[in-house]
Image (tube, rainbow, N blue to C red):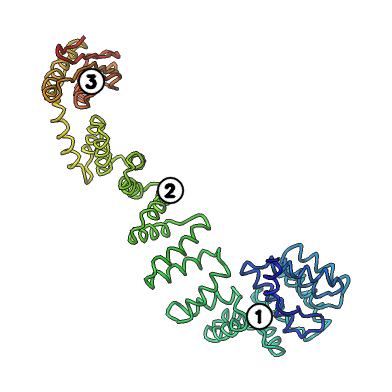
Amino acid sequence: MVLSMCCAQAWAAEPPGVTAPLPEVMKELRRIESAAWHGRLDAVRVELQNLQRARPSDPMLRVYVAWCSMPTDDAWNQLKGIAQMFPDLPWVHYGMGRIYVGWKMRDLATTALENALKKDPKFYPALVTQGDVLRLKDEFDQAEAKYRQALAIADDAEARTGLGLVILKQGKADAAKVELQAALSQWPDQPAALRELVKLLGPADPAYARQLATLGELQPKDRDVRRQLATLKFDAGDKRGALDEYEKLLKLGSPDLETAQRMQSMYRELGDAEGEERLTVILSGLDRDGVAPLIRLAELRAAKKDVDGAEKNLLAAVERNRERADTWLRLGRLSLEKNLLSQALERFRLGAATTTPGAEDCRAEALKLEELFKLPTKRAKGTVDRIYGQVAGTLDQLFRARAKANPKLAGVMKVRVKVSAAGVVELAEVTEDTVGDPVLAAHALFALREAEFEKKRREPVFEFELGPLSGGK
């Protein structure tokens, strides 16, 4: 019921028949083509098919149904079938000629169009398409002659378009502009004419925006048109409208870096954190060596209290460039926020070891933690037992100082150390900690990590029991 009503509105009048004047039939064919451009073709096709079933002997209804599939194999097969039943119908040969042009089979197109003109030498639609064939072959003078021959018979929209396009190729921009405007005033749904007219008008022309918008409606998947519409709205101060056009561009796939950067900047200016975050994710994928998008993502996620998400982005940034102190600084501060003090010192030290901006801040942060951890000024050195004794002594002093504020502080801490044959510590990790004080754990970890062991491969585990009778085992 709804479909029938919709189609009735689309086809308020009966489609013209065989004896109808050429302009009336062309108007109906263009109505079908316009419906295709605007995404309304299915409703028109159903209406025509219903009419065809009701009047199977009407050849023009068959032509109109075939036109709904132009320029496909299905349309060609339908037209071929009609030609066998109605060989003198010029519309069939004209339609097949149009299909051949779309398929770039120009010799066959020429033959089909000549067949149409044999039936009626004043059949100007075939003359127009002959002009199209010649124009596509860069035979501009001959093409112009065909278009003018057609226009001498009828003031046809497509003949005007063809003439405008061919004289534009001849360098006559002003004359081409006149012809294209005339063509579009008769039939606005001509992307080829619109595309060239938009170029001729330029953004300063009052008609530019309207014609460009029409072109965008007809060719929604055209990247250049979408970009031009976005730029037009951006220049007019309509940032939200520009973003809508850019979003349509993104949906076409394969976004480019420049577009993503502009969109990210616009979302940021508008205070749209969600939009900015989404575009920054895209940017981070497009700029595979860039660190800035990942850092910005970390900022946005930290603002949402998504500490883990922010840390993930910063770690990805470090993978791309380990020499940026500002990234290590951010990571270290996130570790502080999560109360992972040992990790924070490691990160601050990595940043302090660079010569990039932020290194001094990393050194300052590292110094604060080193003072908090009361790391020994002199490294532990010697045998495993000797190192154990030295670290246990400094750890006990720190424990007693911190136990004053927390008398219940007690427990066992174990640190596993992996030493190379050269006496270098390759790994130091806390494997057990029932004390639960990150400052004490950091003291033990870094004191052992920086100790100077004998040149012998080994993996000792240091156990510290801290409490009222603190001391090691």
| Residue at figure coordinates x 35%, y 54% from the top left | 273
- Reading the chain from its start, which is encountered first: label 1 or label 3? 1
Q: Quadrant of the N terminus?
A: bottom right
In this rendering, the answer to whether 129 lies above or below 417 is below
Residue 360, position as x, y percentages in the image = 17, 42
Residue 401, position as x, y percentages in the image = 11, 23
Amino acid marked by disc 3 = Val
In this rendering, the answer to whether 57 lies above or below 424 is below
Q: What whole-number distance in Å separates the C-alpha atoms at marks 2 and 3?
A: 44 Å
- Which residue is under mark 1? 158
| Residue at figure coordinates x 58%, y 77% from the top left | 193
In this rendering, the answer to whether 264 lies above or below 154 is above
Q: Label 1's element?
A: helix
- Which residue is under mark 2? 285
Q: Is residue 416 left or right of residue 467?
A: right
Mark 1 touching mark 3, by CB under 8 A? no
Q: Is residue 80 left or right of residue 137?
A: right
- Reading the chain from its start, which is encountered first: label 2 or label 1? 1
Q: Is residue 273 left or right of residue 396?
A: right
Q: What whole-number distance in Å separates the C-alpha atoms at marks 1 and 3?
A: 87 Å
Amino acid marked by disc 1 = Glu
- Which picture quadrant has residue 384? top left
Foreground residue among 201 and 15: 15
Number of the label disc, if any, that sits on residue 435? 3
Q: Nearer the viewer, mark 1 or mark 3?
A: 3
Q: Label 2's element?
A: helix
- Which picture quadrant has residue 448? top left
Q: For mark 2, does the 10 Å Cα neighbourhood hold few (<14), some (14 to 19), or many (20 or more) residues?
A: some
Q: Label 3's element?
A: loop
Q: Nearer the viewer, mark 2 or mark 3?
A: 3
- Which picture quadrant has residue 341? top left
